Image (cartoon, helix red, strand yellow):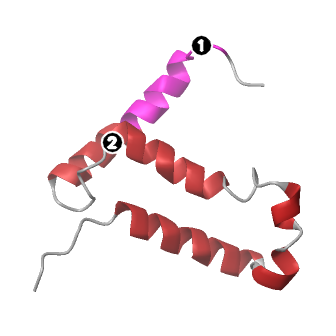
Amino acid sequence: MEREQSFEPEVAGYRARVVAIAAAQQAGKLRNDIPPAELMAMVIGVVISWDSAAWSLKALQPEFGFHDLASRRAAVVSAVAGLVQPPQPNS
């Protein structure tokens, strides 16, 4: 069960990660058009998406989904990379 209020040790952990995201955004290593805390939430959403997916969607896994943990991990890594990478300058 989720708490209905923040818990300072957990806030501190998230703060450190969000500060790191903000620094990477300022350095041009991550996209900067999404605020760092929102980007962190989006990444978490991608990472947990399969665990929170509807059972009816999970039923399609054998036909359309990953077949092992390595391919699942590769799909998540690819999705997160696409989400966070800064736009490429037009050539």
What is the three-letter code of the residue carrying label 2? Pro
Helix, strand or loop at label 2? It is: helix
Q: Residue at x 84, y 84 (%)?
A: 63
Instruction: Choose between 64 and 43: the one closer to the eye.
Output: 64
Left of 28 or right of it: where is 82? right
Q: Residue at x 47, y 32 (%)?
A: 13
Task: Name above or below for residue 50 compared with residue 72.
Answer: above
Q: Quadrant of residue 22?
A: top left
Tell me the residue that label 1 is attached to.
5
Tell me the residue that label 2 is attached to.
36
Horizontal and vertical percent position of residue 24: 24, 53
Task: Name above or below for residue 42 compared with residue 90.
Answer: above
**Residue 1 part of the magenta-drawn span:** no
Task: Name above or below for residue 30 compared with residue 9.
Answer: below
**Residue 7 part of the magenta-drawn span:** yes
Q: Residue at x 40, y 40 (%)?
A: 38
Determine the CA span between mark 2 and mark 1.
Answer: 21 Å
Q: Does the image show residue 37?
A: yes
- Residue span colored magenta: 4-16
Q: Residues within 10 Å of mark 1 (few under 14, many from 20)?
A: few
Q: Quadrant of residue 16?
A: top left
Q: Does the image show residue 67?
A: no
Left of 1 or right of it: where is 39? left
Quadrant showing the C terminus: bottom left
